[in-house]
Amino acid sequence: MKVHTVILLAGGNDKNSGELLLKALQMLENEIGKIVTKSAIYRTAAWGPIPQPDFMNLAILMRSKLPPKLLLRRILDIETRLGRVRTIKYGPRTIDIDILFYGSQIIKTDTLTIPHPEIANRRFVLMPCNEISPNFVHPLLKKTIRQLLLECKDELEVKLWA
């Protein structure tokens, strides 16, 4: 079975999100594959129409043998076991784990779009990704993470979690 490079973004803005991120990392390594590296945790103002606490986010670079749909199912299961309940779109979350990249593959189904369609528009995604893989080339946009970060128009402040 082929091993794929996978880049994920994990985050949350619940009072226990820091603890949940640590649990998520352990579960991802146990159930998805080897964590090669991870970024620092970044703090970002919440994005979207609902007032809510700041988010904690980190990027994770992994190696996994799982095919994309099974990877998604396992991630959704991990989120559920960590208390994620999907209620309001762009609302507060205990934990959220997004598949940003699956190697250089381009996947579009009813339930899965890779690369994640909003990567280039979100500084809170690009900053931690730039920390772990600045030279990774977005397979659709043909630009490195570093280039996308430099061009990003998102003005939300993203800073290291103190």
Image (tube, helix red, strand yellow):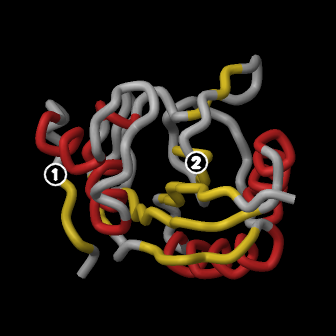
Compared with residue 23, is residue 116 higher up or lower down, i.e. above or below?
above
Q: Quadrant of residue 64?
A: bottom right
Name the kind of residue labelled 2 in the image. Gly
Provide residue 160's location: percent of width, then percent of height. 23, 72
**Which sits in the foreground, 96 or 150?**
150
Provide residue 87's location: percent of width, then percent of height. 68, 35
Q: Quadrant of the N terminus?
A: bottom right
Label 1: few (<14), some or many (≥20) within 10 Å? few
The residue furthest top is 110
Label 2: few (<14), some or many (≥20) within 10 Å? some
Q: Quadrant of residue 28?
A: bottom right
Residue denoted by label 1: 157
Q: Quadrant of the C terminus?
A: bottom left
| Residue at the image position 84 percent from the left and 47 percent from the top | 73
Report the number of numbered marks.
2
**Which sits in the foreground, 51 or 1?**
1
Which type of secondary structure does the marked residue at label 2 adopt? loop
Q: Quadrant of residue 72?
A: top right
The residue furthest front is 2
Provide residue 15's location: percent of width, then percent of height. 50, 70
**Which sits in the foreground, 118 or 7?**
7
Earlier residue among tags 1 and 2: 2
C-alpha span from label 1 to label 2: 28 Å
Task: Please report contact status of discs 1 and 2: CB closer than 8 Å, yes or no.
Answer: no
Residue denoted by label 2: 103
Name the kind of residue labelled 1 in the image. Glu
